Image: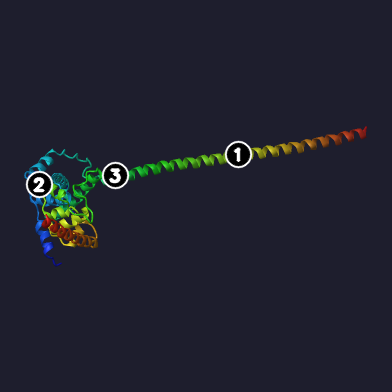
Amino acid sequence: MIEDAFEKDLREQLRTREAPGGFADRVMTRVAAKPARRRWPGFGMPVWRWAVAALLVAGMVLGSVEHDREQRREGERAREQVLLALRITGATLRDVQEKVDAESGQETRKQSGGMDREGQAQE
Amino acid sequence: MRVQRQRTRPLEPSPETFRDIVERHQARVFSIAFRILGESGVAEEVAQDVFLELHRSLARLESEDHVTAWLRRVTCHRATDALRRRAARGHGSAVEYEDGMELRPAVRGFLPLMNRVEQLLLTLPPAQRAVMVLRYQEDLEPEDIAVELKIPLATVRSSLHRAVQLLRAKAERTLKEYSRD
């Protein structure tokens, strides 16, 4: 890159300036006054790794709790189905019983009616 | 054979070591901040903050070149941030930057400590000031500026071209004003 007189002038006038007197002293005073950073008690492991580990553990715990809940819900559903099946079976059995009772009542009445008629004929 | 990387715990530098670093780089850091901000007091405040930040980050920096590049980059960013904060609070710098702007006599009087080029520099947008300072104060090539400021090379080149053109035009007009005065 070829520089012309103007750019040389720019470079000349933009030479590094001296910092104000006592600058380094003021910086060092602020460094010394800065509260010591509290060390993360992470046994040498960086904070982000602890955060990732904590997230993984939290995920596993939540997953396990959710799994338990799902199993309980499935158990509830199966229980409901068994109870429903039992209710249906009970109702069906009652119907059948009633029909059987009704049939046998008619049969008895028929038989007793026939016997009466036979007796009257013998007499 | 697998080579295990040695993990090193960040160490705080001794006060003597850090003071030596401050003394070696203070002029560079202050000059960058001063030329972007245009005010000595604010520039010193920003420069001090940069060194405090360096104190916290020093353990991660591997070489003297790395420290120098870090200081240049962070100073440019912090000075530009300070300029934005001041503008947002309504305390814009004494000189507003517009393409067509010239330095008014009142502004020239307000900045007695600055040379002519430094005053003209303040009429540029902050991003262009930073690029110009790195190019002409720090003597960096456009490629190095792009790497240090993490901006595209084409942006650096166009910023430099535009800034030099603007400054040239303004300098010519200012010279005419001076000669008329």
Which residue is nearer to you in this view: B170 or A35?
B170
The x, y position of residue A34, in whole percent, is 15, 39
In three-dimensional space, the C-alpha distance between marks 1 and 2, rounded to whole angstroms, equals 85 Å
- The answer to the question of whether label 1 and label 2 lie on touching residues, with beta carbons closer than 8 A, is no
> Disc 3 marks which amino acid?
Ala
Q: Name the residue under label 3.
A: A51
Return the disc, 1 or 3, that comes first in the chain's sequence: 3
Q: Which amino acid does label 1 sit on?
A: Leu
Q: Which residue does the numbered mark 1 point to in the structure image?
A: A86
Task: Compare residues B86 and B113 and report the one nearer the observer.
Answer: B113
Quarter of the picture containing the C terminus of chain A is top right
Quarter of the image where one finds residue B44:
top left
Mark 2 Cα within 10 Å, few/some/many (few <14, many 20+)? many
Q: Mark 3 falls on what kind of element?
A: helix
Residue drawn at the location 22% of the way across and 46% of the way down = B92
User: Closer to the observer: label 1 or label 3?
Assistant: 3
Secondary structure of the residue carrying numbered label 2? helix
Q: In which quarter of the image is residue A122?
A: top right
Judged by depth in the image, the label closer to the viewer, 3 or 2, is 2
User: Which structural element holds mark 1?
Assistant: helix
Q: Quick check: can you spot residue A83?
A: yes
Cα–Cα gap, marks 3 and 2:
32 Å
Report the amino acid beneath label 2.
Answer: Phe
The image quadrant of residue A121 is top right
Determine which residue is flagged by label 2: B18
User: Which residue in the rendered view is the most extreme toward the bottom?
Assistant: A2
Residue neighbourhood size for the residue with mark 3, other residues' Cα within 10 Å, grouped as few (<14), some (14–19), many (≥20): few
Q: Where is residue B173 in the image (x, y as percent from the top left)?
A: 16, 59
| Contact (Cβ within 8 Å) of mark 3 with mark 2 | no
**Which quarter of the figure is the N terminus of chain A placed in?**
bottom left
What distance separates the C-alpha of mark 1 from that of mark 3?
52 Å
Residues flagged by tags 1 and 3 on a common chain: yes
